[in-house]
Amino acid sequence: MSNVNFFDEKSEQSKVKTLIVSKYFVAWAKVIIATAKRNKHIPKIAYIDLFAGPGRYNDGTKSTPVMILERALYDTDLKNSLVSVFNDANKEYANSLREAVDEIEGINQLKYSPIIKNEEITEGIVKEFEEISLIPTLLFVDPWGYKGLSLKLISSVLKDWGCDSIFFFNYTRINMGLSNDLVETHINALFGEVRADLIRQRICELKPEQREIYILEQLTLALMEMGGTYTLPFVFKNEGGRRTSHHLIFTSKNFKGYEIMKEIMARESSLSEQGVASFGYNPADINTPLLFELSRPLDDLGDLLLKEFKGKVLTMNEIYLAHNVGKPYIARNYKTALRKLESENKIITNPPPKERKRIKGEVTFGPDVQVFFS
């Protein structure tokens, strides 16, 4: 598939991607605006999409920029705070987006009119971001391949308060590009030259499934080194469900953003085993329901907690904060696992179950409940 017919119709994967980005944008914006108000600042936030594409797919489906702007119009704070910048190097796409934006009902209600550009993403854009102090910004980078996507670009935005990034990691093309001298510069920009050379040497020894995990791990490490302490990948499989097509990568300096995105990605996952999300969209998941329960991820969580916190006393919230980063579990998974350990008498809690509330017959497990690990 070329980028010419990429926009013919919106695949299920693209719909999920748009949902994740737009849901996070709204949740992120609410947190940033509320924080600004508490500090008596005038709220002003930015959404920047450097590879925005056309306003609609050829089948009429709305693109991500249009979805973002429409969501903003539902909220008074967003209408008065949002500065939106959309860019695409393809002039036809930029014009299409401009037309679609102009057609949005009530678009003039936005305090700041959307800015639509038609530029190549070069080092000049990175230097511009590096040299200014950005208002809280959500950067979305969704290139067709990898040209224009770099660690420096992500870092140039992430450096400032309230700034997060979501980008499209085209695993198929990057995997091929690692052994292609013609695109060496672009691959080096994405991983860093030293790490890119290390990856090239290492992947020759790895099986395909190991190769993917290794490449993704190296990308995550690179992001963490430049400030993206909290990074989450969401994997998309091809139509057959056997091979990875791409990942959506979220990175932030702030745990709250990580927590919000983790909940969103969990809800949009196509598979959940014992209530633990797969953090991926696989079209084949619904065809193999028998395989779902062969893995017991929630049982694993209970065992992990018993081992890691042996001899300690912590609240439920302290356990969650100390353990969840880099793992597929969200807050409700911890409550479920701890409730199960409690029923099996493997932990002691304060207050005990009989003194806590019940909701629909189930004992609650609030954030302040103390857990005694023997």
Image: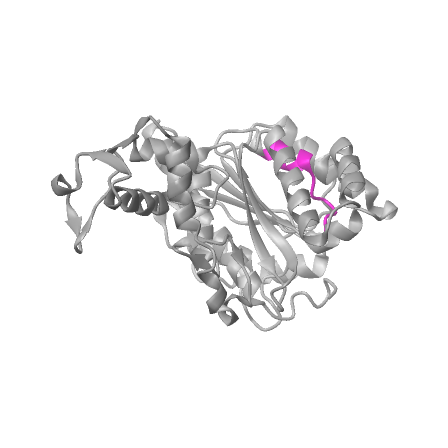
From the image, which quarter does the C terminus lie in? top left
Which one is nearer the viewer's eye here, 155 or 51?
A: 155
Q: How many marks?
A: 0
Q: Position of residue 278 (x, y in %)?
A: 49, 54
Q: Is residue 172 magenta?
A: no
Specify whether 224 is left or right of 372.
right
Which one is nearer the viewer's eye here, 20 or 331?
A: 331
Which one is nearer the viewer's eye here, 306 or 186?
A: 306
Q: How is the image coloured?
A: one colour
Q: Position of residue 262 (x, y in %)?
A: 45, 46
In the picture, residue 335 is in which quadrant? top left
Specify whether 30 is left or right of 193.
left
Look at the picture and state if 245 lies above or below 162.
below
Whether residue 177 can be seen here: yes
Q: Residue at x 58, y 65 (%)?
A: 56
Specify whether 212 is left or right of 297.
right
Q: Position of residue 72 (x, y in %)?
A: 43, 51
Whether residue 144 can be seen here: no
**Residue placed farthest to the right in the image?**
181
Q: Residue at x 47, y 62 (%)?
A: 292
Q: Position of residue 369 (x, y in %)?
A: 23, 34
From the image, which quarter does the N terminus lie in? bottom right
Look at the picture and state if 161 lies above or below 366.
above
**Extent of the magenta region:** 144-157
Look at the picture and state if 104 lies above or below 371.
below
Q: Is residue 151 magenta?
A: yes
**Residue placed farthest to the left in the image?**
355
Q: Residue at x 36, y 29 (%)?
A: 310
